[in-house]
Image (cartoon, rainbow, N blue to C red):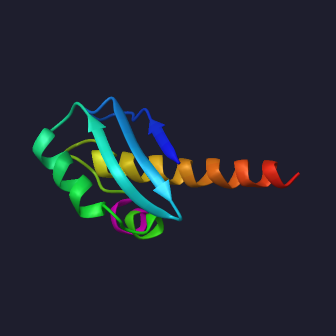
């Protein structure tokens, strides 16, 4: 399923990705440090969402208490939660 997330406290203004069977695909950041964000997308392509969260959650950028990678993990966690809720609703 395609997910879209509006990050906070970082340069990108949108994070989009597909979460398929617990794996991350087609990650795209809108705005921000183009080269670095493309590199992150390549590195996490096909990775288990839980692994990405474990590796990058809490990563900071300069004086900020978050980063693009940290915001991405928040997006992934929100997507996982959203999919869990939708799955439960479909069973009811």
Is residue 67 in sight in this rendering? Answer: no
Expressed as whole percent of the image width and height from the top left, the position of residue 44 reads: 30, 62
Q: Is residue 48 left or right of residue 45?
A: right
55 within the magenta span: yes
Q: Quadrant of residue 23?
A: bottom left
Q: Is residue 91 visible?
A: yes
x%, y% of residue 29?
Answer: 28, 39
Q: In the visual, does 11 lie left or right of 92?
A: left
In this rendering, is residue 87 above or below 11? below
Q: Position of residue 6 (x, y in %)?
A: 43, 32
User: Of all residues shown, which one is farthest toward the left?
Assistant: 35
Which residue ends up furthest to the right in the rendered image? Answer: 92
From the viewer's perspective, tell me whether residue 47 is left or right of residue 20. left
Q: Bounds of the magenta span?
A: 53-57
Asked if residue 33 is positioned above or below residue 23 in the image, the reply reads above
Q: Disc count in the image?
A: 0
Side of 10 relative to 16 (left or right): left
Does the magenta run of residues contain 40? no
Q: Which residue is found at the position 20% from the left and 46% from the top?
A: 37
Residue at image position (47%, 67%) is 50
Which residue sits at x=42%, y=62%? 53
- For the stretch drawn in magenta, the main secondary structure is helix
């Amino acid at each position: 399923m395609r997910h879209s997330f509006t990050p906070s406290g970082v340069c990108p203004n949108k994070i989009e990705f597909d979460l398929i069977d617990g794996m991350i695909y087609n990650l795209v950041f809108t705005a921000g440090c183009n080269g670095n964000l493309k590199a992150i997308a390549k590195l996490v392509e096909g990775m288990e969402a839980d692994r990405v969260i474990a590796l990058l959650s809490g990563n900071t950028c300069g004086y900020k208490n978050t980063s693009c990678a940290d915001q991405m993990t928040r997006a992934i966690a929100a997507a996982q939660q959203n999919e869990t809720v939708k799955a439960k609703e479909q069973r009811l």
